[in-house]
């Protein structure tokens, strides 16, 4: 397995939806590829943190800027 395939399979791997043969192949790759280990670990931790957190309200000025940018991108007027 090459690093690009790890990235392509990452979501299914972390969700537990990857074919067992691919899990084995990916695990072998992770056993010697530090870069992919870092990506998998960081992604897993990010998902865990995100799932445990409460949504934060955007400050009004940020919301207004995002709304304005969104409308401009679509060519709409609020």
Image (spheres, rainbow, N blue to C red):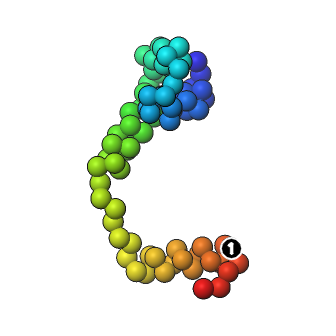
Viewer-proximal residue among 4 and 22 = 22
Q: Is residue 65 visible?
A: yes
The crowding category of the residue bearing disc 1, from other C-alpha atoms within 10 Å (few below 14, some 14 to 19, many at least 20), is few
- Residue 46 figure quarter: top left
Q: Can you identify the residue that label 1 sits on? A: 74
* Position of residue 23 measured from the top left corner of the image (x, y, whole percent): 48, 19
Residue shown at 58% from the left, 18% from the top: 1
Image quadrant where one finds the C terminus: bottom right
Q: Is residue 76 left or right of residue 12?
A: right
Viewer-proximal residue among 11 and 17 = 17
* Position of residue 51 measured from the top left corner of the image (x, y, whole percent): 34, 48
Residue shown at 68% from the left, 73% from the top: 74
Q: Is residue 57 left or right of residue 16?
A: left
Q: Is residue 32 visible?
A: no
* Position of residue 13 measured from the top left corner of the image (x, y, whole percent): 47, 28
* Position of residue 76 measured from the top left corner of the image (x, y, whole percent): 67, 80
């Amino acid at each position: 397995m090459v690093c690009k395939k790890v990235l392509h399979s990452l979501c299914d791997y972390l969700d537990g939806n990857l074919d067992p043969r691919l899990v084995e192949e990916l695990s072998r790759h992770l056993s010697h590829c530090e870069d992919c280990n870092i990506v998998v670990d960081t992604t897993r931790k990010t998902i865990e943190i995100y799932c445990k957190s409460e949504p934060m309200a955007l400050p009004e000025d940020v919301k207004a800027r995002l709304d304005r940018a969104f409308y401009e991108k679509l060519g709409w007027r609020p």
